[in-house]
Image: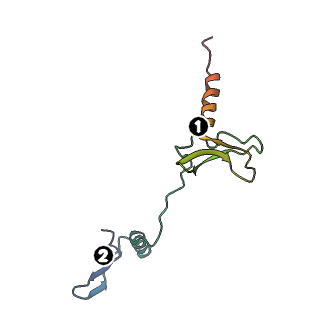
Amino acid sequence: MMRNPIYIGKIENPDYGISTQGDFEPVVEEATFYRAQAVLDGRVVVSGPRQRNHPDFPLRGFVRCDVCGRPLTGSWSKGRNGHYAYYHCQRQCRAVNVSKAALEGAFVDELALLQPTPG
């Protein structure tokens, strides 16, 4: 359906050598149609919006660097035996680089201390 030029008002039949503009109003603008053709052909890379809250790093943005005060970000590092997750400082600081398991474990321990008492 997205390949049919009839939607931009063109009538084409390569078997009979017919290519003419129809006398009806096009459904889609020509620029939009050709952009869709480029996407379908793979000539244009379509990228969705950047995912800000990645499920691999739930604490990203909540925990801050001890030195510069900026929020920590998360990333995967490739090691000899696999990929490893780390939280680290974003900018030039680079003071904090802690493994995901250690930071999230410390966060869970801190949450356990903040549980309300029955009284």
Residue at the extreme bottom of the image, as rendered: 17
Q: Position of residue 14 (x, y in %)?
A: 26, 84
**Residue name at image x 58 percent, y 45 percent:** 85
Which of 16 and 53 lies nearest the eye of the viewer? 53
Q: CA distance from mark 1 to mark 2?
A: 57 Å
Q: Which residue is mark 2?
A: 6
Residue at the extreme right of the image, as rendered: 67
Compared to residue 94, the image places residue 100 above or below, namely above
Compared to residue 106, the image places residue 14 above or below, namely below
| Quadrant in the picture for the N terminus | bottom left
**Residue name at image x 49 percent, y 58 percent:** 48
Residue at the extreme left of the image, as rendered: 16
Along the horizontal axis of the image, is 41 left or right of 119? left
Residue at the extreme top of the image, as rendered: 119
Please tell me in which quadrant of the rendered image residue 110 appears: top right
Q: Which of the two discs, 1 and 2, sits closer to the camera?
A: 1
In primary-sequence order, the first of circles 1 and 2 is: 2
**Discs 1, 2 touching: Cβ within 8 Å:** no
Say which amino acid is labelled 2: Ile
Element under disc 2: helix
Q: Which residue is mark 1?
A: 101
| Quadrant in the picture for the C terminus | top right
Along the horizontal axis of the image, is 17 left or right of 25? left
Say which amino acid is labelled 1: Ala
Q: Position of residue 45 (x, y in %)?
A: 48, 67
Q: Position of residue 87 (x, y in %)?
A: 63, 44
The mark tally for this picture is 2
Along the horizontal axis of the image, is 116 left or right of 13? right
Element under disc 1: helix
